[in-house]
Image (cartoon, grey):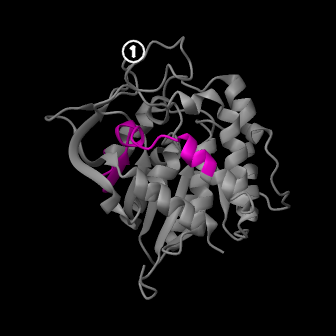
Amino acid sequence: MQKNKSKIPLIMDTDMGPDDWFAILYLGKRNDIELKAITISGTGEAHGPKGAINCLKLLKLINKNDIPVSFGPDTPLIHDHHFPKLMRFVIDKMLFLKLPKTKKRPHSMSAVEFLNQFLINSDDKITFLATGPLTNLALLFNRYPAVKDKIAKIYLMGGAIDVAGNISSVNKSINNPHAEWNIYCDPKAANIVFQSSIPIVMVPLDATNHVLVDEEFVQFAKENNDNPISALLFRLLKRFGSRIEKGMVSLWDAVAASVIGREHVAQIEERKLIVIEDEGPESGRTKEDLQKGVLVNACMKIDKEQFVSHFFKTILQE
C-alpha cells in the first residue's frame, strides 16, 4: 500500500456475531481504511444495545475509542425470522470471553438517524460494509433516500447463489435449504438495499465456503498468543470444537472485509439477483433472475492463502 494513497472512509453495519468481532478488529488495524463509525443491526445475532457495548469493548482493545457506535431496532421489516434465543443470549455475552471494560456508551441517536446525520455532513462519499441483516440500511434508504448519493459502494456478506444456504446448520427445524442467515433474517430489507442503485459487491456463501478455518489456521492463532487479537481469536476458535474439524466454520465477515479495496483476491462475476420475500422454504433466497434481477458484483471464490496471509499480517502489526 502506497503511503500517499488516501484511505477508504468506511462505515460498518454489523450484527456482532463472532466473525464480526474479528472483521472489526481487522478493519481497525488496516492502514488503508479509515473506520468512521459502526452501527449494529439488532435483527441479527446480537441484540442492538448489547452488541453496541460489546463493539465498544472491541474498539478499546485496539485503542480506537473515538469511533462512534450506534444500534438499530431488533424487529425486521417483515416476518419474524430470528436466530435461536439461546444463541442470541450467548452472543450477547460474547461467548463469555473476557474483554477490556469501557466507560464509553453507544451514540444517543438510533443507527438510522446517526447514519443520516453522518452522511449529510460528510464531505466524502462513504463506503459501507454490511455483515448482518440489512435492516438499518433499508430503513435509512426508505426514510432518507437522498443519502444514497453519499454512498460510494456497499460491500456485504450475505446470500447463497450457486450453493446451499446455511439455515439448517443453526436451526434444523426450519425447512429452508436455500437462504443464508443475514438475508433470511430480513429479506425485505435485502431487496431494498439491492434495489438502491448503489454499487454492491456481495460476498456470499459461494465465496466464504472456500475460506474455511482449519487446524493450521487455529495453530497460527495459538502461536501468536502474545498478540491480544490473536489470543482472543484462539480462545474463540476453541469454542467451536469439532465444528472446525467438520469444515463448518469460516470467518465469514472477516473474509468479506478482506475484499474491500482488494477485489483482486476474489473471483467476481456479475449476477442479476432477486431476494425471495414470501414466507416459505425459499424465504430469503438470493436467486438469479435474468429478467427481474438486480445486477450485483458477486464474489464467487476467494483466494484463501491471500486472505489468511493478509488477515494475520494486519492483526499482528504494531
Question: Image check: 213 left or right of 165?
Answer: right
Question: Image check: 262 left or right of 67?
Answer: left
Q: Residue at x 46, y 86 (%)?
A: 3
Query: Is residue 150 at all visible to an observer of this figure?
Result: yes
Question: Image check: 61 left or right of 305?
Answer: right
| Residue at which label 1 appears | 281
The quadrant in which residue 272 appears is top left
Placement of the N terminus among the 4 image quadrants? bottom left
Compared with residue 157, is residue 61 higher up or lower down, i.e. above or below?
Answer: below
Is residue 299 inside the magenta stretch?
A: no
Nearer to us in this view, 110 or 174:
174
On the image, the x and y values in percent for residue 110 come to: 65, 52
The quadrant in which residue 92 appears is top right
Part of the protein shown in magenta: 195-219
Q: Residue at x 13, y 34 (%)?
A: 291
Nearer to us in this view, 311 or 172:
311
Q: Residue at x 61, y 45 (%)?
A: 218
Compared with residue 317, is residue 309 higher up or lower down, i.e. above or below?
Answer: above
How crowded pointer 1 is (Cα within 10 Å; few <14, some 14-19, many 20+) is rated as: some
